[in-house]
Structures are given as structure tokens and as C-alpha cells.
Amino acid sequence: DLVSMAGIGMMRLVTSIALTLSGNQVLAFGGIIRSSTSVPVLCSRATPVPLASLRAHSPSASDDDRLAVWRHAHVAMHRAVQRSVVVVRSVAQKVALTLLTLMVCMPFSPSYSLALPAIEPPAIEAQASSRPRYYEQALSTPLVTETAMPAVALRLPGLDGTLIGRRKTSFVTAAVQAVGPAVVRIDTERLVDRPALEGYLVPGSPDGQRKESGQGSGVILSEDGLIMTNAHVVKNAARVTVTLIDGRTFEGVVKGSDDFMDLAAIRITPSGKPLPTAPLGRSGELQVGDWAIAIGNAVGLDSTVTLGIISSLSRSAAEVGIPNKKVNFIQTDTAINPGNSGGPLVNEFGEVIGINTAIRANAAGIGFAIPIDTAELAMKTLATGKTIRHAYLGFTMLSLTPDAARLNNEDKKVNVVLPQQYGALVLVVGPDTPAARAGFRRFDLITEIGGTAIKSAADAQDLVDKAQVGVTLQVKVIRDQKLMTLEAVTGDLADAPRVPEGKKEGRVPPKDGRTEGSSS
């Protein structure tokens, strides 16, 4: 380091001298130039004629001869000095250009004392400690490794000459190393009813039932063997086998499951070395465009990693196409395939931000995950074997906009006049439901619930989902162009009767691309 700095300093000094010589300061080296006859000659045309000195050197010559000789010598010396200045200036410029080129192009040995310090994420650690966790271990792999020099192969002077290879700087690699060991494969066996004639075609099957295998993914939350996955992965499973990335297998027990959130808790009894666990992030901090990494056993290929971004947030179950779910999903373009269900969606910091759940069958690059904030809260209940209670009212609804209502009202074939404003339009009221007991009717437009304005069916669904079972909700609706208030007591969705589809009446409302259905 000292040798490199000294060399740079010397180059700068020589360059400064060369640039000085290439300028007009070269005349400062002029002064008095003496000829071979020891006659003092000054390099200035304004110099007075030294007659006294000329007479002393040439007493026998006339003044005219003395002046002629002096002028001839003066002009010759002046021209010689000018030529010298031009030569010196040209040489100095070439030297300066050469030195500058060397300073710019010469490769220097890297200096580790000038390296930038590694960046640590203190904010994330503070947030991680602000809320209770299932785990208490830090990441075993640093998220940021080397930020000073490019990742190149080089030999350090003064060391043993060992070749230092390129360093891994990909955030995807660091994230996979942090979460990947905690991702497991879940194999299930379930007994399903078989058709009446299947016993004749498949000899040896149990009477009335046959075995059916399934596979999915999961993520280990704690060292005592708590695993989170999707409910549809382990639904009706008679046997659950958990396989770790290191090849260890365990028999799993489903402690709790919730079909409405599509979450399940599996417990295994660990043995041998400690189980790896995955750090959890905060889905509430996500923004559209953030990196997203999916890890799972896609189509039976263990530990498959795909990369994408967060495409959208808070997608309602109705928008996703599964209106019977009580979750607002994260949308991502990360490739999610069969077998990824139950696996983690990871951010660039190596933290789980969601649980991969579903894909849009008629599209590419559209997948959905349950936010980790929602899943973590649910796991605290499911891990203890308890059931999560979900509030509901018992009707299906559709988002209504002023434009959709206007188009509907202009159609002379439609016998229903809709209010031209935003809200949630009730389409079907289930019999023997809280909504039916509260007096809801078809084509009621919900504009307010509990003092909160309703602009869409998603708004109404979100408020009902957040309510507790047995709570009375004040609901304002518009019926026959009149505003009225209904009082509805939320019921438990587990006790809800099947909501009928109802008969289609008229055209409600026209398809304008901005409506969405939901059930509450």
C-alpha cells in the first residue's frame, strides 16, 4: 500500500514539473547567456547596447563594427533560445502525455485497506426483534459479503501466492442458503372412495376405497419440528412423510388445518442434528416490484428455485378466482408449479414473506401466495390444535360502479334499476344465514359497514373478515332508491349452510371489466 501511494505521488510530482516546463515559465530559465567570447548577451530585444564592454574587448575596432558584431550575435542567440524553447516545450508535452496515459491505464494491485466496509441491515434485525418469533437463530450466511473490488481472480503480493477465486455476490444465492435448508418435501397418502366397478379392475384394493398419493412443500418454523404448509396439501391425508434437504425423513402429524385460509400445521419429532429453520420477514413491508424467490419441490423436482418480482398486493380471493378463501393474496410472476404449494416465497434478504398457494391456470407468470403476516398469526392457533373462527354474513356480492349502473339502467330489457354510485351489490342471500335474518335482499347496494364507506365488494369482504364472530354490524344499504340501515350479527363460517346459486333474473350488471364477485 505504501509503495503504491509513493509511486502515485512521484508520478504526480513529475507530471507537474513536465506541465510547468511545457508552459511559458520556461523563459524563467533564460537569464544571462554567455557566448564563447565571454560577451554577456541578454535574451531580450529591449536590452541596451553595452558600448563600454564592447570597446574594452575590441579597442582597435570602430563603434560601427562593434555594433554590427553585437547585433549579429544578439540575433543569433535570440533565435537559438527560441528554438530551444520550442524543443523543450514539445518534449515536456510528450512526457506529460505519456505520464498521464500511464496513470490512467496502468493496472495497480488492489488495496484491501481501501475496501469499503460490508453493509449490514440493522433495520431488518430491529424489526425482527420487535415481534415474537418461532426461531431465535441468526442467518448463518452473511447477506452482503464483499463490496470493495470486482469479483476477479488475482494473486495478492506478499502472501503465499494462493489464487483467490471469484466470490459469490448474488443475493439469490444468499437467500437460498438462508432459507433452502428449511424447505421440506411433503408426501401424502389418502384413502378415497372408488367407483363401484373399480374393484374388478384393480384387484387387491381395500373394499370401497383406494390409496391416492400427493406431494407438496413446506417450511420449518422451529427447531422443535413445527412445519407450515397448505391445507390442500395434507387434506384428508392418512399418512404424511416429511423429507429434508439432507435426506432425513420423518413421519408428520397434522396438528391443525384451515381450509378457508388454506393453511396447515404439521408436527414432526426431530432426532439427530438440530432442524434448520427459516427466518420470517414482514409481508406488510412489501412493495410492488420487490424481488421474490420461490423455493419448493416443483413437479417432484426437489429444491427448485425460481426468481421474479412482486406483481401486486392484496389481491382478494374473488379476484384470484377462489372466492371461498378468506385471504388477500400476494401476486407474483415467480414461476410456481404443482408441488410448490406450501413452499416459501422469499425476499432478497433471505426472509419468508409468503406461502405459495395457487396459480392462474389460464395465464402464465401469475401466481399467488399467502402473506406471511397472515400465515404466522394463523399458525399460532393451528399449532395448538385449535380451530380458527371466521365471521360471515351469508350473501354473495358484486362490485358496482356508476358506469356499470348507468349501462344497466339504459337497457330497456332490464327490469332492475341500480343506484349509480360505488358500492357492493348483493346478488344472492343464503337461507338461514345471518344476512337473511338481518333482512338483506337481492340488489341491495351496500354503501357502509360499521361507519366505513364501501366502494367495492372487496371492501365489504375485508371488513366482514376482520370482524369477530357474534359481533353486530351496522350496514347501510340502498334499496329502491332509499337509504336504510340493517343490523347483522356475524356467524361462524364453519357452521354456515351451503349458499345456493339462485335464479338468474335480468342482466346484472353489464360486463365493464371492473366488477368482481365475492361471498361474505
Image (cartoon, rainbow, N blue to C red):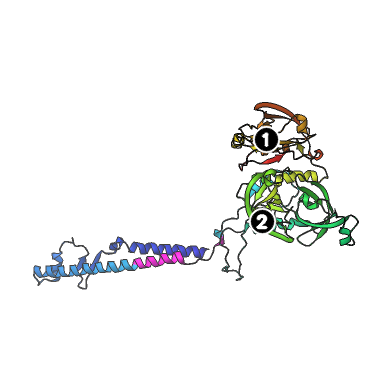
The residue type indicated by label 1 comes to Leu
Tell me the SS state at disc 1. strand
Seen from the viewer's position, the closer of residues 74 and 281 is 281
Q: Nearer the viewer, residue 304 or 440?
A: 440
Q: Which residue, as the protein is rendered here, is positioned at the far front?
A: 413
Question: Of helix, strand and loop, which one carries label 2?
Answer: loop
Name the image quarter holding residue 130. top right
| Residue placed under numbered mark 1 in the picture | 425
The percent coordinates of residue 58 (x first, y second) are 13, 71
- Magenta stretch: dominant secondary structure: helix
Q: Which kind of residue does numbered mark 2 sit on?
A: Ala
Residue 436 vs 50, above or below: the answer is above
Residue 103, x across and y down, in percent: 44, 64
Q: Which residues are magenta?
A: 92-112
Query: Whole-percent x and y of residue 376?
Result: 74, 46
What is the CA distance from the residue labelled 1 to the residue labelled 2?
35 Å
Q: Closest to the observer: 49 or 402?
A: 402
The answer to whether 298 is drawn above or below residue 94 in the figure is: above
Question: Is residue 471 at least partly visible in the picture?
Answer: no
Discs 1, 2 touching: Cβ within 8 Å: no
Which mark is on residue 335?
2
Residue closest to the eye, 352 or 122: 352
As for residue 390 lying within the magenta part, the answer is no
Which comes before the other along the chain, label 1 or label 2? 2
Q: In the picture, which quadrant includes the C terminus?
A: top right
Q: Residue 97's spot in the image, x, y percent?
A: 38, 66
- Decide: is 73 above or below 186: below
